Image (spheres, rainbow, N blue to C red):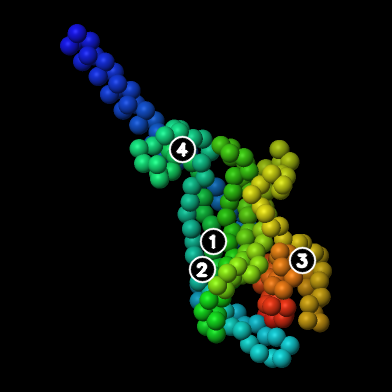
Amino acid sequence: MKQHLAILILAITTLSYACNKKCESVKTGAVALNEISQTYTPYQDGASLTFVNEQGEEMVFTNERIAEDFRICVKYLCKNTSDPFDQIPCEYYEAQGFRNLLRTASNDTMIIELVVSTENYQSESTLFYDLFSIHMSTIGPLTRGQYVPHIGFTDPVFDQNTTSITEPMIEVSEIELMGKTYTDVIYTNDSTDHTLYFQKGKGLVVIQLAGELWELVE
Protein backbone atom coordinates (compact mmCIF):
# COMPACT_ATOMS: atom_id res chain seq x y z
CA MET A 1 0.00 0.00 0.00
CA LYS A 2 2.80 2.40 0.98
CA GLN A 3 4.64 1.54 -2.25
CA HIS A 4 1.55 2.34 -4.35
CA LEU A 5 1.08 5.62 -2.47
CA ALA A 6 4.69 6.60 -3.07
CA ILE A 7 4.36 5.85 -6.79
CA LEU A 8 1.13 7.92 -6.96
CA ILE A 9 2.76 10.90 -5.22
CA LEU A 10 5.76 10.68 -7.57
CA ALA A 11 3.46 10.58 -10.60
CA ILE A 12 1.48 13.61 -9.41
CA THR A 13 4.68 15.52 -8.65
CA THR A 14 6.13 14.69 -12.08
CA LEU A 15 2.89 15.69 -13.84
CA SER A 16 2.70 18.93 -11.88
CA TYR A 17 6.31 19.78 -12.73
CA ALA A 18 5.75 19.04 -16.42
CA CYS A 19 2.57 21.12 -16.45
CA ASN A 20 4.21 24.09 -14.75
CA LYS A 21 7.16 23.90 -17.12
CA LYS A 22 4.84 23.77 -20.12
CA CYS A 23 2.87 26.74 -18.83
CA GLU A 24 5.77 29.17 -18.77
CA SER A 25 5.49 31.94 -21.36
CA VAL A 26 7.88 31.56 -24.31
CA LYS A 27 8.94 34.14 -26.87
CA THR A 28 8.52 32.70 -30.37
CA GLY A 29 8.94 35.81 -32.52
CA ALA A 30 8.88 39.57 -32.85
CA VAL A 31 6.85 42.05 -34.87
CA ALA A 32 7.90 45.61 -35.69
CA LEU A 33 5.75 48.63 -36.37
CA ASN A 34 5.54 49.55 -40.02
CA GLU A 35 7.67 52.61 -40.93
CA ILE A 36 4.60 54.57 -42.01
CA SER A 37 2.81 53.71 -38.77
CA GLN A 38 5.71 55.16 -36.78
CA THR A 39 5.05 58.58 -38.34
CA TYR A 40 1.74 58.74 -36.46
CA THR A 41 3.62 59.62 -33.27
CA PRO A 42 5.90 62.22 -34.91
CA TYR A 43 6.98 64.33 -31.93
CA GLN A 44 10.29 63.91 -30.15
CA ASP A 45 10.63 64.18 -26.39
CA GLY A 46 10.46 67.82 -25.29
CA ALA A 47 9.05 69.09 -28.60
CA SER A 48 6.82 72.17 -28.42
CA LEU A 49 3.68 72.78 -30.50
CA THR A 50 1.90 76.15 -30.65
CA PHE A 51 -1.72 76.52 -31.77
CA VAL A 52 -3.41 79.89 -32.39
CA ASN A 53 -7.12 80.75 -32.58
CA GLU A 54 -8.74 83.44 -34.73
CA GLN A 55 -8.22 86.02 -31.97
CA GLY A 56 -4.48 85.40 -31.96
CA GLU A 57 -4.45 83.66 -28.58
CA GLU A 58 -1.87 80.91 -28.17
CA MET A 59 -2.10 77.42 -26.71
CA VAL A 60 1.30 75.76 -26.29
CA PHE A 61 1.80 72.01 -25.82
CA THR A 62 4.96 70.22 -24.71
CA ASN A 63 5.45 66.60 -25.71
CA GLU A 64 6.61 63.58 -23.75
CA ARG A 65 7.60 60.64 -25.96
CA ILE A 66 7.33 57.12 -24.54
CA ALA A 67 8.44 53.82 -26.10
CA GLU A 68 6.54 50.78 -24.87
CA ASP A 69 7.41 47.07 -25.15
CA PHE A 70 4.64 44.51 -24.85
CA ARG A 71 3.68 40.94 -25.73
CA ILE A 72 1.14 39.62 -28.21
CA CYS A 73 0.04 36.07 -27.35
CA VAL A 74 -0.20 33.81 -30.40
CA LYS A 75 -0.90 30.55 -28.54
CA TYR A 76 -2.12 30.05 -24.98
CA LEU A 77 -0.36 27.27 -23.08
CA CYS A 78 -2.43 26.98 -19.94
CA LYS A 79 -5.86 28.09 -18.74
CA ASN A 80 -5.01 28.25 -15.04
CA THR A 81 -2.25 29.97 -13.09
CA SER A 82 -1.35 29.93 -9.42
CA ASP A 83 -2.20 33.63 -9.19
CA PRO A 84 -5.59 34.72 -10.65
CA PHE A 85 -4.10 38.14 -11.41
CA ASP A 86 -1.26 36.69 -13.49
CA GLN A 87 -1.41 36.73 -17.29
CA ILE A 88 -2.14 33.36 -18.87
CA PRO A 89 1.16 31.79 -20.00
CA CYS A 90 1.50 31.78 -23.76
CA GLU A 91 3.75 31.68 -26.78
CA TYR A 92 4.18 35.35 -27.67
CA TYR A 93 5.59 37.81 -30.14
CA GLU A 94 7.52 40.78 -28.77
CA ALA A 95 6.06 44.08 -30.02
CA GLN A 96 6.75 47.77 -29.59
CA GLY A 97 4.55 50.85 -29.49
CA PHE A 98 5.07 54.59 -29.18
CA ARG A 99 3.15 57.26 -27.30
CA ASN A 100 3.11 61.06 -27.56
CA LEU A 101 1.70 62.87 -24.52
CA LEU A 102 0.99 66.55 -25.20
CA ARG A 103 0.36 68.80 -22.21
CA THR A 104 -0.25 72.54 -21.98
CA ALA A 105 1.05 74.64 -19.08
CA SER A 106 -1.98 76.96 -19.23
CA ASN A 107 -4.28 74.04 -18.38
CA ASP A 108 -2.49 71.22 -16.55
CA THR A 109 -5.51 68.95 -16.80
CA MET A 110 -5.57 68.98 -20.61
CA ILE A 111 -3.84 66.10 -22.36
CA ILE A 112 -3.72 65.05 -26.01
CA GLU A 113 -2.44 61.52 -26.45
CA LEU A 114 -1.27 59.87 -29.68
CA VAL A 115 -0.54 56.13 -29.55
CA VAL A 116 0.53 53.66 -32.23
CA SER A 117 0.79 49.94 -31.54
CA THR A 118 0.52 46.52 -33.16
CA GLU A 119 -2.63 44.46 -32.63
CA ASN A 120 -3.63 40.88 -33.35
CA TYR A 121 -6.58 40.52 -35.72
CA GLN A 122 -7.60 37.11 -34.43
CA SER A 123 -6.94 35.39 -31.12
CA GLU A 124 -3.99 33.00 -31.19
CA SER A 125 -2.86 34.05 -34.68
CA THR A 126 -0.03 36.00 -36.32
CA LEU A 127 -2.37 38.27 -38.27
CA PHE A 128 -0.99 41.64 -37.19
CA TYR A 129 -2.10 45.18 -37.98
CA ASP A 130 -1.04 48.59 -36.67
CA LEU A 131 -3.49 50.79 -34.80
CA PHE A 132 -3.30 54.55 -34.26
CA SER A 133 -5.34 55.96 -31.37
CA ILE A 134 -5.76 59.60 -30.44
CA HIS A 135 -7.72 61.28 -27.68
CA MET A 136 -8.09 64.60 -25.91
CA SER A 137 -9.19 64.94 -22.30
CA THR A 138 -9.36 67.37 -19.40
CA ILE A 139 -11.07 66.16 -16.22
CA GLY A 140 -13.01 63.80 -18.49
CA PRO A 141 -12.74 62.65 -22.12
CA LEU A 142 -13.46 65.20 -24.87
CA THR A 143 -12.86 63.30 -28.10
CA ARG A 144 -11.30 60.04 -29.22
CA GLY A 145 -10.61 58.24 -32.50
CA GLN A 146 -8.87 55.22 -34.01
CA TYR A 147 -7.35 54.56 -37.41
CA VAL A 148 -5.53 51.62 -39.06
CA PRO A 149 -2.40 52.83 -40.93
CA HIS A 150 -1.06 49.39 -41.84
CA ILE A 151 -2.36 45.82 -42.28
CA GLY A 152 0.26 43.09 -42.32
CA PHE A 153 -1.78 40.39 -44.06
CA THR A 154 -4.08 39.92 -47.06
CA ASP A 155 -5.85 36.68 -46.16
CA PRO A 156 -8.39 36.86 -44.64
CA VAL A 157 -9.66 40.23 -45.83
CA PHE A 158 -9.38 42.78 -43.01
CA ASP A 159 -12.80 43.76 -41.64
CA GLN A 160 -12.66 46.67 -39.20
CA ASN A 161 -16.09 45.72 -37.84
CA THR A 162 -14.64 42.56 -36.31
CA THR A 163 -11.98 44.47 -34.33
CA SER A 164 -12.21 46.38 -31.05
CA ILE A 165 -12.26 49.72 -32.92
CA THR A 166 -15.28 51.61 -31.59
CA GLU A 167 -14.61 55.18 -32.74
CA PRO A 168 -13.13 55.10 -36.25
CA MET A 169 -11.73 58.37 -37.56
CA ILE A 170 -13.03 60.00 -40.72
CA GLU A 171 -10.55 60.10 -43.62
CA VAL A 172 -10.67 62.82 -46.28
CA SER A 173 -8.36 63.62 -49.17
CA GLU A 174 -8.90 67.37 -48.69
CA ILE A 175 -10.47 69.67 -46.10
CA GLU A 176 -10.55 73.45 -45.52
CA LEU A 177 -10.03 74.72 -41.99
CA MET A 178 -9.52 78.34 -40.91
CA GLY A 179 -9.10 79.42 -44.53
CA LYS A 180 -6.39 76.86 -45.29
CA THR A 181 -6.65 73.64 -47.31
CA TYR A 182 -5.18 70.45 -45.84
CA THR A 183 -4.71 67.17 -47.71
CA ASP A 184 -4.72 63.55 -46.45
CA VAL A 185 -6.43 64.29 -43.15
CA ILE A 186 -8.07 62.02 -40.58
CA TYR A 187 -10.16 63.43 -37.75
CA THR A 188 -12.20 62.34 -34.76
CA ASN A 189 -15.95 62.15 -35.11
CA ASP A 190 -17.47 61.44 -31.70
CA SER A 191 -18.25 65.04 -30.73
CA THR A 192 -19.45 68.17 -32.54
CA ASP A 193 -17.69 70.53 -30.10
CA HIS A 194 -14.28 68.84 -29.81
CA THR A 195 -12.33 67.48 -32.78
CA LEU A 196 -8.70 66.59 -33.50
CA TYR A 197 -7.49 66.98 -37.10
CA PHE A 198 -4.40 64.94 -37.98
CA GLN A 199 -2.54 65.27 -41.29
CA LYS A 200 -0.75 62.12 -42.43
CA GLY A 201 3.00 62.47 -42.52
CA LYS A 202 2.89 65.60 -40.36
CA GLY A 203 0.78 65.36 -37.21
CA LEU A 204 -1.84 67.50 -35.53
CA VAL A 205 -2.77 70.55 -37.62
CA VAL A 206 -6.01 71.84 -36.10
CA ILE A 207 -7.73 71.39 -32.74
CA GLN A 208 -11.38 72.18 -32.21
CA LEU A 209 -11.96 72.85 -28.52
CA ALA A 210 -15.48 73.70 -27.31
CA GLY A 211 -16.37 74.69 -30.88
CA GLU A 212 -13.35 77.00 -31.30
CA LEU A 213 -10.64 76.18 -33.86
CA TRP A 214 -6.94 76.38 -33.07
CA GLU A 215 -4.40 76.11 -35.90
CA LEU A 216 -0.82 74.85 -35.65
CA VAL A 217 1.75 77.61 -36.08
CA GLU A 218 4.37 76.52 -38.63
Q: Earlier in the sequence, mark 1 or mark 4?
A: 4
- Tag of residue 45: none
Q: Nearer the viewer, residue 174 or 123?
A: 123
Can residue 218 be seen by looking at this rendering?
no
Specify the amino acid type for callout 1.
Phe
Q: Earlier in the sequence, mark 2 or mark 4?
A: 2
Give the side of residue 62 with respect to residue 205, left or right.
Answer: left
Percent x, y of residue 149: 68, 56
| Alpha carbons under labels 4 and 3: distance apart | 40 Å
| Alpha carbons under labels 1 and 4: distance apart | 24 Å
Mark 1 = which residue? 98
Q: Residue at x 69, y 91 (%)?
A: 56
Mark 1 touches mark 2? (CB < 8 Å): yes
Specify the amino acid type for callout 4.
Cys
Q: Nearer the viewer, residue 86 or 96?
A: 86
Mark 2 touches mark 3? (CB < 8 Å): no
Q: Residues within 10 Å of mark 2 (few under 14, many from 20)?
A: some
- Tag of residue 184: 3
- Tag of residue 65: 2
Q: Residues within 10 Å of mark 1 (few under 14, many from 20)?
A: many
Residue furthest front in the image: 140
**Element at badge 2?**
strand
Q: Earlier in the sequence, mark 3 or mark 1?
A: 1
**Element at badge 3?**
strand
Percent x, y of residue 181: 81, 76
- Mark 2 vs mark 4: in front: 4
Give the side of residue 54 with respect to residue 122, left or right.
Answer: right
**Image quadrant where one finds the C terminus:** bottom right
| Alpha carbons under labels 1 and 2: distance apart | 7 Å
